[in-house]
């Protein structure tokens, strides 16, 4: 993952379209395309057993081993997104899993170490520890220079913008629910909710300020293998507003990819659900998720393109004691690992062929190697 301060200089040092120039001035003026590789993953959902697995003998927590097998993918992308499904409010709130989550703050260090930078907090568990818990989480995440938090804020506008490789990405994020927990009356914008009037206003304000507009959507119904009507209607709404990319999550299972026509003649790319990224949910559909991979491009004429669109399947592995949790890209997963999976003894249908069957409905290119 590139350092933010140095990132815009790196493309000039890496390549040019010409064998000449021989001088720095010529080199910097050479026309060429700029590209930005982008990875996004779904729900990082930390249950009680997951918390226990991260507890070490000395009483501290360490979740970095969970992500070791996918770290090289994230690190080698130019930018990476993750849906942080649980708050990290600190020890004073008590650590807990379902139904009211509060994850040890060591998780943020693991997320940072893996290379994620764009963290979505607009989801139905954002208010699990109330306003004070979310404030504490935001304050803590603000101590990480690399994090760009979207979907929640203590004050100020919702939109976030980041520029890399001379390409500007705009981010917005929305959730359908807070599980019945109300937003503070004196801070109703603390979490961005799905509201078409508000979304229209924010998208219209952000659209001229960025090359590509990305919207994170926490939506749909849990465990449905296909998007429901609310998702497809909202996807059409976002496409009508010329959104470039929709990152969907919440159903905890993979749902299909779709391209939707836009008024400006381009297409909105929509992954309806990337499924679980890391969790201890205990059904076979919920242990396979996906890492979305795409490339944004701006050519010398400032024309914009998205290509190299694909999905890396990811398996959440844990043993029968719900220990040794680790994420594996499917191309590194094996029959031996599957035989030791905590769900295998109780589910004979949990096979490698099952994973491949899930991918048949995804309607996107499946990547069975590290694309970087």
Image (cartoon, grey):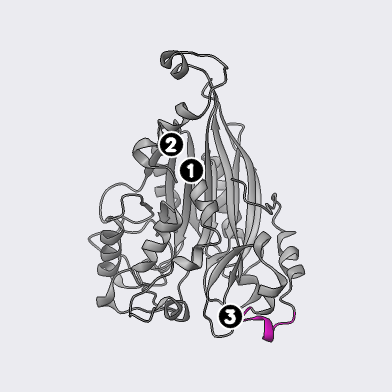
Q: CA distance from mark 2 to mark 3?
A: 40 Å
Q: Position of residue 172 (x, y in %)?
A: 42, 48
Question: What residue does disc 1 label?
Answer: 78
Question: What residue does disc 3 label?
Answer: 319
Query: For numbered disc 2, what is the local secondary structure?
Result: strand
Question: What residue is at 41 percent from the left and 14 percent from the top?
Answer: 25
Horizontal arrangement in the rendering, residue 136 relative to residue 251 (left or right): left
Q: Quadrant of residue 256?
A: bottom right
Which of pointers 2 and 3 indicates the residue nearer the eye?
3
Q: Quadrant of residue 128?
A: bottom left
Q: Earlier in the sequence, mark 2 or mark 3?
A: 2
Q: Earlier in the sequence, mark 1 or mark 2?
A: 1
Q: Quadrant of the C terminus?
A: top right
Question: What residue does disc 2 label?
Answer: 164
Q: CA distance from mark 3 to mark 1?
A: 33 Å
From the viewer's perspective, is residue 14 above or below residue 317? Answer: above
Question: What residue is at 70 percent from the left and 74 percent from the top?
Answer: 336
**Is the Cβ of the residue at disc 1 closer than 8 Å to that at disc 2?**
yes
From the viewer's perspective, is residue 160 above or below residue 218? Answer: above
In-front residue for pair 250/200: 250
Query: For numbered disc 1, what is the local secondary structure?
Result: loop
């Amino acid at each position: 993952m590139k350092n933010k301060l140095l990132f815009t200089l790196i493309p000039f040092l890496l390549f040019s379209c010409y064998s000449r120039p021989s001088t720095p001035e010529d080199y910097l003026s050479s026309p060429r395309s700029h590209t930005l590789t982008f990875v996004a993953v779904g729900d990082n959902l930390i249950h009680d057993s997951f918390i226990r697995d991260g507890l070490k003998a000395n009483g501290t927590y360490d979740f970095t081993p969970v992500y070791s097998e996918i770290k090289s993918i994230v690190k080698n992308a130019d930018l990476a997104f993750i849906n942080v499904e649980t708050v990290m409010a600190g020890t004073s709130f008590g650590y807990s899993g379902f139904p009211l989550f509060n994850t040890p703050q060591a998780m943020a260090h693991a997320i940072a170490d893996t290379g994620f930078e764009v963290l979505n907090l607009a989801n139905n568990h954002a208010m699990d520890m109330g306003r004070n818990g979310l404030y504490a989480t935001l304050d803590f995440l603000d101590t990480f220079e690399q994090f760009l938090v979207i979907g929640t804020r203590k004050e100020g506008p919702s939109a976030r913008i980041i520029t890399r490789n001379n390409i500007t990405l705009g981010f917005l994020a929305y959730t359908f629910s807070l599980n019945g927990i109300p937003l503070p009356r004196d801070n109703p914008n603390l979490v961005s909710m799905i509201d078409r009037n508000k979304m229209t206003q924010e998208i219209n304000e952000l659209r001229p300020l960025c090359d590509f507009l990305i919207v994170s959507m926490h939506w749909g119904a849990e465990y449905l293998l296909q998007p429901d009507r609310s998702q497809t209607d909202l996807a059409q709404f976002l496409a009508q507003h010329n959104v470039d990319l929709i990152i969907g999550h919440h159903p905890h299972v993979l749902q299909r990819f779709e391209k939707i026509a836009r008024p400006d003649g381009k297409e909105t790319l929509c992954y309806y659900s990337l499924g679980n990224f890391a969790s201890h949910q205990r059904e076979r559909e919920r242990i396979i998720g996906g890492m979305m991979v795409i490339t944004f491009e701006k050519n010398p004429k400032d024309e914009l393109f998205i290509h190299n669109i694909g999905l890396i399947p990811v398996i959440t592995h844990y043993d029968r004691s719900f220990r040794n949790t680790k994420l594996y890209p499917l191309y590194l997963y094996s029959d031996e690992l599957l035989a030791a999976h905590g769900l295998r003894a109780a589910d004979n249908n949990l096979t490698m062929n099952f994973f491949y069957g899930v991918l048949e409905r995804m309607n996107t290119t499946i990547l069975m190697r590290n694309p970087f």
